[in-house]
Amino acid sequence: MKHYGQGKSTGMDQTAIGKVEAGFARADLIVSPADGEILRPVAERVAKIASSAAMAEKRKLWKDHNALKKGRPLVFCDPEMGWNEVVTEDQMQCQGKLARAWEMDLRKEIFWAEEMKDDKPLDPFFEIPYSVTPDDWGLKETQIKTSRWDRSGGRRRSGIMKRICPRFIRPN
């Protein structure tokens, strides 16, 4: 574990939404030949670990667990937002935005398998997540402030809320 956590944080967003809202521009989606040469041996190392008997056993343990078969308790550890302190800038070699995201994912899998050694299986495939750019779908946000209070202590209906909120009438 001496190679982990020894450098400056990568500052990469490691949240689930950060993986999807990566903010890639078209130019970011190109992996340079140099980055490809860096990623290839890292991916080969992940593939070798994923094809091991230990990982096959872990996959079987999780399938049995999900099928509600009796077995030992399974352990899953996730550093979550601590990944930037585990895999640091010193280990990252790729330059391109997409290549760096893939490199981080691969290095996380290696750490999980070789250092964390929990029951998380390393899959024999590399998942490429979809990527989106947040969009307002052509609708611009408008805020309507209300500052009047009615006698019952609540806010009065005003602006758009008057138009779209239903009024409930008590039957006589």
Image (tube, rainbow, N blue to C red):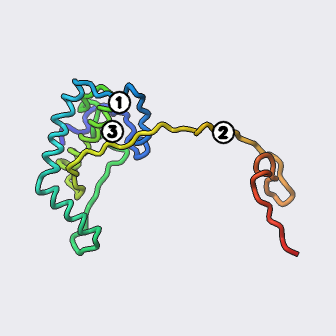
Q: Of discs 3 and 2, which sits in the foreground?
A: 2
Question: What's the amino acid at mark 3?
Answer: Asn
Question: What's the amino acid at mark 2?
Answer: Glu
Q: CA distance from mark 1 to mark 2?
A: 31 Å
Query: Are circles 3 and 2 on residues that touch, CB within 8 Å?
Result: no
Q: Which mark is residue 139?
A: none
The residue at 23%/75% (across/down) is 70
Dividing the picture into quadrants, the one containing residue 92 is top left
Q: Of discs 1 and 3, which sits in the foreground?
A: 1
Q: Of discs 1 and 2, which sits in the foreground?
A: 1
- Which SS class for mark 2? loop
- Which SS class for mark 1? helix
Residue 71 location (% of width, % of height): 21, 72
The residue at 44%/33% (across/down) is 23
Q: Which mark is residue 141?
A: 2
Question: What's the amino acid at mark 1?
Answer: Leu
Q: Which residue is mark 3?
A: 84
* In the image: residue 35, left or right of residue 52: right
- Which SS class for mark 3? helix
Dividing the picture into quadrants, the one containing residue 144 is top right
Earlier sequence position, callout 1 versus callout 2 = 1
The residue at 13%/57% (across/down) is 54
Q: CA distance from mark 3 to mark 2?
A: 34 Å
